[in-house]
Amino acid sequence: MLTKLDVDASDERGTTLVELMVGLAVGMVVLAALTMVIIATLHGSARVSARVEATQRARVVLARIIEELHSACVAPKVAPILAESSGNSLSFTHAAPGESSAVAPSPIKSVISLEDGELSQADYLPAPGDTPSWTYSSTRQLITDVGPISPSDSIFTYYRSLNGTVTEAPPATQLDEMAAETIQVRVALTASPAGTPVADAGADASVQDSAALRLTPPSFSEQAVSLPCQ
Amino acid sequence: MPGGIGVCGPAAVKARAGSFRWVWVLSDRAQSPPAAEQGFVLIEVLVSAVILALVAAGVLTLLSATTRSAASERVHSQAYGVAQEDQARMRSMRISSLNRLEEANEVTLDGSKFTVESTGVFVDNATGDESCTEGSSPADYVRITSTVRSAQMVNPVVVQSAVAPSTGSLDPSHGTLSFSATNAAGDPLSGVSISGTGVAGFNGQTDSTGCANFADLPAGNYTMTTSAGGMVNMLGETSTSKPIGVSAAGTQTVGLRYDVPGNIEPRFQYRVGSTPTMLPATADSILVYNAEMGTLGRAYWTAGHTRQATVPATGLFPFIHADTVYAGACEKNNPVPAEGAPARASVLVTPNGTATPLITLPALNLTVKRNSSVVSGATVKITDEECKEPNGSLVKRIYTTEAGGHLTEPGMPWGIYSVCASGTFKEGSNNVTRYASKTKVSVKNLTSGTPLELELSSTSSC
């Protein structure tokens, strides 16, 4: 009859150590893999929530700009887009928020411009007098950490009707006389999530929408010019 | 002490190796040589690692599924935005460009590629659908549809809205052509090709509602061509060209009916005298008529054609009501009275089917004699007194008498005939021709035939 002590002490020590080491090594490998998985998951979920946040921020601003453009036709045959508009600065007139009188509308002028990744809106109130003139009222920051969808693009794209088809107005520093023919404005922007500790380009969100500045479909005639707010 | 735990020797461990219970491993280790144990412990560690890996794989799958669904949600919301933008784009287009618009564009947003299909159709206010059966008012509004697809989405995002034509957005000198295609049962038929030339051109196919609207066509005269694959219209034509006019600010509605054609191959029979059974007959022409055809019927073969056991009528529209078939070359051969019913077959034409009705022909029981003895080989010219060829002359059929002096084929279309028989005989060294004729012979007896005896005696031809 063998006793435990007779066998244990001499035979098993080395083996147990090897086993232990192998076991540890395998365990480490598994743990390392698990840790990687957890890190990847955390990273992914952080990116998802950052993206959601960026999308939320961008959507709110986009909806606001589009809503204001939709309220731009305060009177028939008014050209709401102003000549000083350019690719990264939209200058237009629209109904003042909360205005109820449609008979004698007094539009306000807004300039939405992009500067150093910050989109802000400056409002101007109409000044008394016959010729339209504007008095600066206030500036409000719309969104930060924002830019065009690709560096070569601009945030605002303007469309006009040319020979019966809607075509993109050629990109220029200023719209100038083309502003009077602009019947559609496209807004496209990319927003980065605010308050992310590490910059992550993959978390940026792009949104785009268009607003038509027409009250009715354009005329059947290809020669007839399709002007805004008709 | 070997009892208790001791029973679990190496053999027992091997036998239960599948269960991997630590208690046996530990007990083994206490009693067996180390060489035999090393492998087991390692294997068990590896096995546990595998199990762990499996669990991890499961968790990982779950995680990736979550990520995928989040990504899909995001792509969906982007696609919706793209569709909205496309709607705004279409709103600034002219109505005439929107009508029958079919455009596909590609948009890349945040690295996801979207395909945008923009369509516009004139729809009707009453049904809210593309309609071609409503009155003659111009279409009420244009329904614009943006369908956005992406490889990352299973289902496309579809956004629809309507644009109402306002004063001045439609050319008052233009009108609408509205086609409605149905099959024999009256169900909508899609895929009927419609094209037209004239003041302008148009081209298209009927959709799943059987409709094809061509709005905003300049008023004037057009030639329209319609076809539906191998199908036939009510007159059996696979392709038709017809003139059609478009009136200014109006809608011209055109109904089209196409279906898979069927065939009728009638057989004929007759009876003369007191013959106990009906005998098979032949015919040279038939007429197929259906009230919905709107014409007098379709003729197959003409009176001059070789008489055969059947006259195949092919390419017939499968009307839901039966067609009437009778032998003859014109509608005067139609056995209208009640007693003429067996001479007419009423058959339902089925798509791709062949009906073989049996038609009883009235017989002319003619006996040609000369000096009271029957004449064989006499020529009998039978003229239909009421039925005219397309060139205006009366329909004529030529028969020859057989050994009994009777017609070889006594069955003939229902009608009133002039019969003229002639035979050539040798009188001395000369050949003389003798004639006999009878007019207003009514061949309308289906049970025993019309008896007629002609004595070749006259010298004046008929």
Image: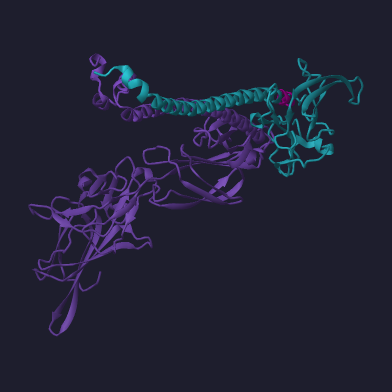
Chain colours: A cyan, B purple
Q: Is residue B24 left or right of residue B457?
A: right
Residue B125 seen in this snapshot? no
Q: Is residue A49 left or right of residue A37?
A: right
Tell me the residue at 20%/52% (across/down): B444
Q: Between residues B40 and B237, which one lies in front from this camera angle?
A: B40
* Percent position of residue B274, x then y: 8, 53
Q: Is residue B324 left or right of residue B95?
A: left
Residue B50 seen in this snapshot? yes
- What secondary structure do most residues of the magenta stretch adopt? helix
Q: Which stretch did the figure color magenta?
A: A64-70
Tell me the residue at 47%/28% (across/down): A25
Give the quadrant of the C terminus of chain A. top right
Give the quadrant of the N terminus of chain A. top left
Q: Residue A116, located in which quarter of the rendered image?
A: top right
* Percent position of residue B75, x then y: 57, 31
* Percent position of residue B65, x then y: 49, 27
